[in-house]
Image: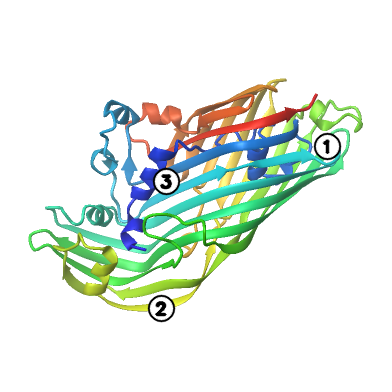
Amino acid sequence: MKLKKLLTLNVFLLIFIASFSQSYVGHSIDNYSGIQGAVYNPSSIVGSNVRADINLFSASVFGGSDYFGINVSDIIKSDGGFDFEEDAEKSPSDANNFFFNADVIGPSFMFNLSKRSSIGIVSRIRANLNINNINGELYEAIVDDFDTGENFNFDSEDLNGTIHAWAEIGLAYGRILMDKPNHVLKAGATLKYLQGAGSVFMSSPGLGGQYTASSETLTTEGELNYGSSRDFEDNEIDFEELTSGFGLDVGFTYQWHPNRDNDTLPSYKDSYKLKVGVSVTDIGSINYSDTEFSTYNLDATVSTSNFEEDTEDFLEDNYVGIETDKATKVKLPTALHLLIDYRISKKFYVSAQADLSLVKDGADFSNAVLNTVLVAPRLETKWFSFYAPLSFRQYGEVSFGGGLRLGPLTVGSGSVITNLLSDNSKTTDVYVGLKIPLYRK
């Protein structure tokens, strides 16, 4: 695996452009979301507004950076000629960050076992990328093979990055723990069997130096660690040779039904006034027993005139390094999800959500979600829902979007309005799904 793959967004951009994939911002809280709701909080599969839900295919993509800023109207006008690295607005700093996740939910289903319990099977393919605290000018120089006529200095502390791809199949179970006339408490868990396709990672506690354009020399100081699992190929992700692991999602949901007279009336037939949910997702990790790991001493001055060669060869030719094989544990992007959902009237709701990473900042061999607080009004009926989420995202990004559910079809984006109106949007997400919902009578 070449280090340059981790330092560039070429992989991210190709996946984003080619996939038409999308993120479930606003949709996961819908009382008719089914499988997508169970992914967010497994307790939502019991006592829901569907007696069964069969997911045929759904996909999500969420990505961005505080380095790149895009103007969607420029992309549309370019007729396919927009170059992210050349045409996007750039905001380089000593600590730029890049993030990306893709989540494809394959054939999955959920159904009620009884009035108080439900079960589901969820199959997914996922890919995550995080690069934290990289100097923006150094990043651009590496992407351009140091084809720049300007001098620059750089200083990055706690630089780290991880790409990880894996598949999972989960067994979800939800149960109503308390069913009183005005109060309902639900719990759920999803035990996941993980199959790792591979990972590549890098880290440096401190990386500084300067580039001199006139002599095409790079002076660096510090240390760089990088490595990859042997089953992570240069040009593609291979899901044929997989590494096993286990994961867990857990969640609880409380509902207040002020007008429910007795507990013989199912809670889904008397809409709650208030719902509060809490869940922790992606507890677990995948162990890769055979990982190539290299540590380089970067205290040197080297020529960049031949940087177009393979980046790994460039490091080996110019720096003193030590290579070892060892086992590596790659952690899942563990996250805490909080929800408050309030029913304004029979069909109108407003929700507030928080998605918070539980992974330590800068942790090696791990991915993390983007910390987000979201407020989303919605219109919700059996066959149709509309969402208008407003998100406050990490690194200061505010995003506004929209989405809808029309029977079996769901489409939307948590940032589509912002992307269309802003000339410097730093995050983008879109989603689509097709399913067979079996509504309750």
Secondary structure category for the residue under label 3: helix
- Look at 54% across and 40% down and name the residue there: 373
Front tag of 2 and 3? 2
Residue 354 visible here: yes
The one of 229 and 273 positioned closer to us in this rendering:
229
Q: Looking at the rendered structure, which numbered label has been put on residue 395?
A: 3
Marks 3 and 2: in contact by CB < 8 Å? Answer: no
Label 1 packing within 10 angstroms: few (<14), some (14-19), many (20+): some
Q: Does residue 194 appear to the left or right of 117 in the view shown?
A: left
Q: Residue furthest front?
A: 240
* Pointer 2 residue: 324
Marks 2 and 1, Cα distance to the nearest angstrom? 57 Å
* Pointer 1 residue: 183
Residue 250 visible here: no
- Look at 76% across and 48% down and name the residue there: 173
The one of 2 and 415 positioned closer to us in this rendering:
2
Marks 3 and 1: in contact by CB < 8 Å? Answer: no
Q: Give the amino acid at mark 2.
A: Thr
- Look at 69% across and 40% down and name the residue there: 109
Secondary structure category for the residue under label 2: strand
Q: Give the amino acid at mark 3.
A: Tyr
Marks 1 and 3, Cα distance to the nearest angstrom? 38 Å
